[in-house]
Amino acid sequence: MAQRKLERAEYRRRKRNGRIVYLEVLRDEVFSKWFKSEIFRAKEAGEAIDEDVLVLSLPPSSQATSYRSMYAFGNHVRVHSAEGNLTTVNSGVAATFSQHYRSSVHAKNLKAANLEYVGWVEEILAVDYGRYELVVLYCNWVMANMVGHNTTMK
């Protein structure tokens, strides 16, 4: 009980300083190794683990399939290099990412901002996990400033 109180006090102290502090095991270890060891530990303890989580804890196949285009969720997506003489563009992507920042060097509180990016698809890769095939879009991003009269692309 006393140990738990000390841990909570330490957590509150770190929180007041405004730093994001990771668990000790995640600081020095690669996430994939940590994730696999946590799944193994949970299995040894007899905990029920979802089959999807077990499949994703295993490494994917060593070969990935590359595609020049794909059709998913009602959208046709092409890699940028495949659109050389075409009049339509299907390689464009857009996303909004959340970023945490401090307003100054001395500020302790984090603020959140939504940043808009646009770009194009460079590669379409399918990674095989056995039961699942994970599609990864490798993109080049450009930061978009779409607010106000200073609309720019960076």
Image: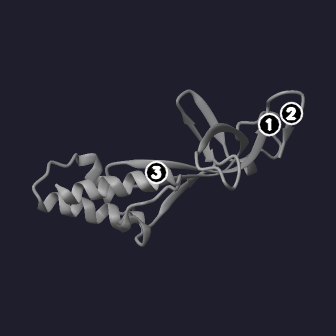
As helix, strand or loop, the secondary structure at mark 2 comes to loop
Disc 2 marks which amino acid?
A: Thr
Say if mark 1 contacts mark 2, CB within 8 Å: yes
Q: Residue furthest bottom?
A: 28
Neighbour class for label 1 at 10 Å: few (<14), some, many (≥20)?
A: some
Q: Which residue is mark 3?
A: 15
Tell me where residue 105 appears, x and y as whole percent. Answer: 69, 56
Disc 3 marks which amino acid?
A: Lys
- In percent of the image, x 56 and y 35: which residue is there? 71
Q: Which residue is mark 1?
A: 145
Tell me where residue 81 appears, x and y as whole percent. Answer: 75, 51
Query: Which quarter of the figure has residue 54?
Result: bottom left
Q: Is residue 100 left or right of residue 143?
A: left
Q: Which residue is mark 2?
A: 151
Q: Is residue 1 visible?
A: yes
Tell me where residue 138 appears, x and y as whole percent. Answer: 62, 52
* Quadrant containing the N terminus in the rendered view: bottom left
Disc 1 marks which amino acid?
A: Asn
Q: CA distance from mark 1 to mark 2?
A: 5 Å
Q: CA distance from mark 3 to mark 2?
A: 36 Å
Query: Which quarter of the figure has residue 37?
Result: bottom left
Q: Nearer the viewer, residue 101 or 71?
A: 101
